[in-house]
Amino acid sequence: MSFLIVIPARYASTRYPGKPLVGLKGANGQERSLIERSWRAAMAVAGNPRVVVATDDDRIRDAATAFGAEVVMTSVDCANGTERCAQAHDVLGGGYDIVVNLQGDAPLTPSWFVEELVAALRADPTAGVATPVLRCDGATLRALQDDRRDGRVGGTTAVFATDHKALYFSKEVIPFTGRSYPKSDDTPVFHHVGVYAYRAGALAAYSSWAPGPLEQLEGLEQLRFLENRQPVLCVEVQARGRQFWELNNPTDVPRIESMLAAMNID
């Protein structure tokens, strides 16, 4: 089964305009743009996937082309990354069994997150979509809670059933625990990692559905699948000593740079 990795990127973000071109210094002090770091993460995935950057902005196209990425131009009317992935797949002529959406704000995504995601989707014919979840330790849970307390839109959390099919995703910290945890202890909260693997049919159906009230309230594209009763498989992945964080706000830049330094990533 062939698969395609699409990195959707738009310049006109309401929360953080120009985010894909923000520079992030690595362990050696060299600055690379967010979109380049996300592309490098995608290129490290095993299985020889085709990797493309999908954008509607000439500045992102020019920057991505300069560091060697293949670029697909998509419409400014794409409401989110999933719609942009669907359109990129169409522009490329379709034909891929699985399309992976590696969002352009997750440059710390380890390759095995994507590899395990694709493997899990291939193994479960009842799921049209799969996405990774990472169990929070006490320190990560506190960081999520701090973001919410201070009014920042931080990471997303997920809750799922015993068969690992998603019940809900939220920018609030769920489930409520009512207690604190030592920084290295496991917690019952799962951080949703912003990567998706779609079967081609599920991806095509997505664009035909209107955004529902939950998607609009939370601003989470994956809720459109749940609102249309399309199962989303949550795949628990292991950090293996890697730190993970997404770039959602300008305050995340120094946090991610410190992680790059700690993990010796140039």
Image (cartoon, rainbow, N blue to C red):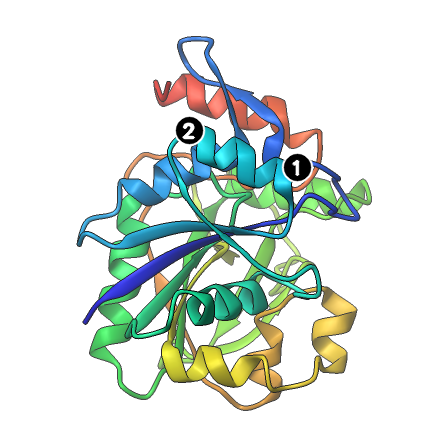
In the image, residue 65 above or below residue 50: above
Foreground residue among 196 and 39 = 39
The residue tagged with tag 1: helix, strand or loop?
helix
The residue tagged with tag 2: helix, strand or loop?
loop
The amino acid beneath tag 2 is Phe
In the image, residue 90 above or below residue 126: above
Q: State the residue at coordinates (40%, 43%).
A: 109
Q: Is residue 235 toward the left or the right of residue 210 in the image?
A: left
The answer to whether residue 69 of the structure is visible from this angle is: yes
Q: Which residue is mark 1?
A: 19
Number of numbered labels in the structure image: 2
Q: State the residue at coordinates (58%, 89%).
A: 228
In the image, residue 36 above or below residue 125: above
The amino acid beneath tag 1 is Lys
Foreground residue among 105 and 264 = 105
In the image, residue 25 above or below residue 70: above
Q: Name the spot of residue 170 as percent of width and height, x first.
A: 65, 65
Q: Which mark is residue 67?
A: 2
